[in-house]
Amino acid sequence: MSYMTANKGGSASSGSETAETPILCESCLGPNPFITMTKQSYGKECKICDRPFTVFRWKPGQGSRFKKTEICTTCATIKNVCQTCVLDLQYGLPVQVRDSALGLKSQMPTSDINKQYYVNNQEARIADSAASGSQILSAIGPATSAGHDMLKQLARNRSGGPNYNRNKPHLCSFYAKGECKRGDACPFRHELPVQNNLSNQNIKDRFHGRNDPVAKKMLSSAASDAGLTPPDDREVTSLFLSSLPEGITDAEIRTWFVSNVSTLEPHQIKSITLVATSKCAFVNFRTRHAAEEAALRCSAKMELGGQQIRVAWGRSRPKKAGTAGAGAGATVSAATTAKEV
Ligand SMILES: [Zn+2]
Ligand SMILES: [Zn+2]
Ligand SMILES: [Zn+2]
């Protein structure tokens, strides 16, 4: 299957204000290789960096609605996403899914002043690399093939190709209320709305890869495929690693998590209990959220010293009245129960 192409013009465009060609995915472009676009310089403010940019508008095929670019080429290039749907160009998946699978950390600040400064800097970098002919998509960085395998699988599960359904006209709000009198002449779609996650998605969240309901759903199904569904007991905040390579240190395990889990800060790992003789370890996180993020990353695959590591959730602590302590006690009881697996 072919995924997304950058723009049909070929090379990446540089400089948001002077963009000659938009950066779009195949789905947003539509099935017709020859489409007419209108172009409006400084037409709108980019929904991410707030700077004015060139807005392109086109109709991606028969029976589809007009589409337009929503974010500038610089922002799209920084994240390697489509300027219209803001999905990853290579896989057609949400940024949050891509970044979790590949362990990419977002460098982009979200506060107004820092954001503009960052985008301006990146724009200069993009222009430089275009001039020298080098690739700018360093945002995508070096990544484990395990992460890419997971993304390929998720992309296949999803549609297996461009999804032109996304270009259909918006739903007719009058039809939903039984009040549309325009019949066939109505430019909107006469279908009843289905409550789905995509309907209330925010473009900034999608871009920055946070609080993305679609991503969350995809990632949790990937986690369950990998046997890493978070346990119901919210007190469980540790992951159990087994088949670790000989001579591994807890520092190496810590480094792997910090550099591979996109949202994880070093202080969020509370402790690591390594049992060298049985080649297993407990990684104890400060919060349930951190543990869940780490488990999602491990759904793709965890490799250390060229060896695939088995990852499972820690077990619940047996309920004992009056034991308040965390830490060592928790680890030991979890360690003993884990051996029963
Ligand atoms: Zn922008
Ligand atoms: Zn798109
Ligand atoms: Zn209607």
Image: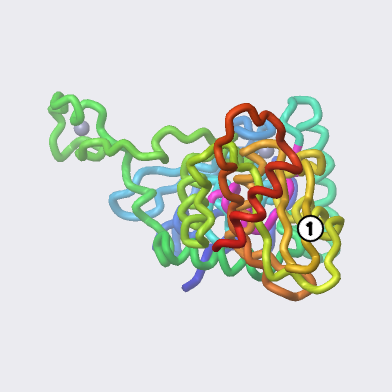
| Residue at figure coordinates x 62%, y 38% from the top left | 288
Q: Quadrant of residue 161?
A: bottom left
Is residue 183 left or right of 298 when viewed as pictured? left
Residue drawn at (14%, 24%) of the image: 179
In which quarter of the view is residue 42 placed? top right
Q: Is residue 107 magenta?
A: yes
Residue drawn 82% across the image and 59% down it: 129
Front residue (pair 146, 124): 146
101 horizontally vs 189: left or right: right
Toward the front, the furthest residue is 321
In this view of the protein, which residue sits in the foreground, 22 or 333?
333
Of helix, strand and loop, which one carries label 1? strand
The residue that appears at 40% across and 39% down in the rendered structure is 197
Task: State the quadrant of the C terminus.
Answer: bottom right
In the image, the residue with mark 1 has its CB under 8 Å from the nearest atom of ligand 1: no
Whether residue 21 is visible to the viewer of this picture, yes or no, is no
Picture coordinates of residue 214, whole percent (x, y)? 47, 45
Q: Position of residue 162 (x, y in %)?
A: 43, 61
Q: Which residues are magenta?
A: 94-108
Q: Position of residue 208 (x, y in %)?
A: 64, 40
Q: Would you say residue 150 sits in the magenta stretch?
A: no
How many discs mark residues in the rendered view? 1
Q: Nearer the viewer, residue 107 or 259?
A: 259
Q: Is residue 238 visible?
A: yes
Callout 1 amino acid: Leu
Residue 123, position in %: x, y?
A: 79, 45
Q: Quadrant of ligand 1?
A: top right
Q: What residue would you read off at disc 1?
A: 274
Q: Is residue 142 left or right of residue 206?
A: right
Q: Residues within 10 Å of mark 1 (few under 14, many from 20)?
A: some
User: Which quadrant holds residue 103?
Assistant: bottom right
> Is residue 331 shown left or right of residue 178?
right
